[in-house]
Image: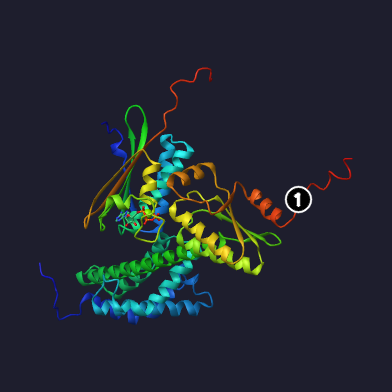
Amino acid sequence: MRVPEQDAAESAPQVVSAFLERRKEQIAQRWADAPLFRSVFTVSRDEAVEACKAVVDALSDVAVSGRLENITAPGFTPVRDQLGRMSQTRTRTGSTPAQIADEVAGLRVPVVDLLREEFTDPTTAQAQECVMALTLLLGTLRLVVMETALDANAELIERQRQQLLEVATPVIKLWEGTVAVPLIGTLDSARSQVVMESLLEAIVDQRARYAILDITGVPTVDSLVAQHLMKTVAAARLMGAECIVSGIRPAIAQTIVQLGIDLGSVLTRASLSDALAYALGKQGIEVSRADTGASAR
Amino acid sequence: MQSSGQASATSLPIGSDADLAWVRQQVRQCAAQLGFGLVQQTKLVTAASELARNTLVHGGGGRAEITPLDNGRSRGLRMSFIDNGPGIRDMELAMTDGYTTGGGLGLGLSGAKRLVHEFSVDTEPGRGTTVTAVAWVAQVPASRPGVG
Ligand SMILES: Nc1ncnc2c1ncn2[C@@H]1O[C@H](COP(=O)(O)OP(=O)(O)OP(=O)(O)O)[C@@H](O)[C@H]1O
Ligand SMILES: [Mg+2]
């Protein structure tokens, strides 16, 4: 069988490219109402149509370069940002990458129908070759969008991770001159850094003399976590505050000792309330029940 | 030695801080399922955290293998931490409390050894390091009459 590689007639990708240019307006009109465009370009329908045209232009460029299956084809470059914005918006409104891929796949039928209409006999070999080429090209577009959707997801996860870093380390003022940080979850180096910074800041802002680090919510205390705790305690000390570590559970206490960590230089209390009582006592504040005095006697 | 639990070994990648958290979670879950008590679970997870971090920081990354064991009398857990990093030149020194080449406390290796029942290191300079730790579920006294 002969493959018409160097045929005198135009190759299928070239035919497809020319078709895309010629029917750009109609294709854009058919795509503009798809959620992929409509929900992203919300200012006006014209805006969505313009966005569709940009994608058609890109596809035409990629087709003429003959690199139908290449997701890194330079033809996609001008619309990469736009595609990224589209998939990001869809991701933010709750679409999964698979759903986004389905939406892109949905763009194929309207444009293939238009292409078929170009041929008087759509069953000829050339017509079918062109439909194949266009299908291939739209498959590549789907991959490009998928790629940007996955990037958008990774970015979202990273952003949430950053938010969690901040949210999970509130410094609480317990009393005049006494602040506390209830630590919850894994204390890796990045989080320890955030904890140390916000604690030191609070010590300065609140003129705190006592700082309590409560580790009830920390599941594992290994040598690195212990080292971070000791560094934080030492830094607080330099700022003129005494640091108390509370909430060391019995299982963790046994483990720390066996591991060989010496917390001897660190002031510890069993619970957050014990630590607070210590801090208040040191400041000459006594807490007693109000009702026992007058009414009981 | 019997090795009936061999089929269910789990291999976990160690390439980031997030992987370390995952290793800890998997060890904790596996230990709880095998019947380890809370204190033993905590020790196992802490040992795993130390050894996995060594694999990451000193070994340049690698993997952990977690295998449930059953020797007929007791159930246990084997954890191996495997890397193809620089290896350890002086094992005796590395096992010394307080020895560190990286600004740590130098308690990871020696401390982890104290937290488990069996501990072995297979290392060769330039080829990599495999640290294996095994712990067995503490034996409950054979009979407790009057409990019902
Ligand atoms: N997987 C490994 N590959 C290469 N060298 C290692 C490995 N594990 C440990 N070492 C060497 O052994 C030394 C001691 O390890 P150990 O875990 O006891 O201390 P550390 O990691 O330096 O500090 P930390 O107390 O924070 O764990 C390390 O500093 C390192 O030089
Ligand atoms: Mg270590």
Closer to the camera in the image, A29 or B142: B142
Side (left or right) of A207 relative to A110: right
Q: Report the residue at 45% width, 71% height from top.
A: A86
- Chain letter, disc 1 residue: A
Q: Quadrant of ligand 2?
A: bottom left
Q: Splitting the image into 4 quarters, where does residue A15 fall?
A: bottom left
Instruction: State the image coordinates of residue A257 (x, y, percent, origin top left).
Output: 47, 45
The secondary element bearing badge 1 is classed as: loop
- Check the image and report above or below for A199 versus B82: below
Residue A122, image x, y percentages: 26, 69
Residue at horizontal 47%, vertical 49%? A220
Q: Is mark 1 within 8 Å of ligand 1?
A: no
Q: In front: A79, or A233?
A: A233
- Tell me the amino acid under the disc marked 1: Val
Report the front residue among A35 and B69. Answer: B69
Q: At 51% from the left edge and 53% from the top edge, which residue is drawn? A: A185
Above or below A82: residue A282: above
Give the quarter of the figure containing the C terminus of chain A.
top right
Residue A151: x and y in percent read: 40, 67
Q: Mark 1: few, some, or many residues within 10 Å (few <14, many ≥20)?
A: few
| Residue A40 percent location from the top left of the image | 49, 72
Q: Quadrant of residue A131?
A: bottom left
Q: Visible in this render: residue B142?
A: yes
Tell me how many marks there are. Answer: 1
Residue projecting furthest to the left: A1
Disc 1 target residue: A287
Q: Residue at x 50, y 42 (%)?
A: A251
In the rendered image, the vertical position of residue A209 relative to residue A38, given as above or below: above
Q: Nearer the viewer, residue B6 or A230?
A: A230
Q: Mark yes or no: residue B14 visible.
A: no
Question: Which quadrant of the figure contains the N terminus of chain A?
Answer: bottom left
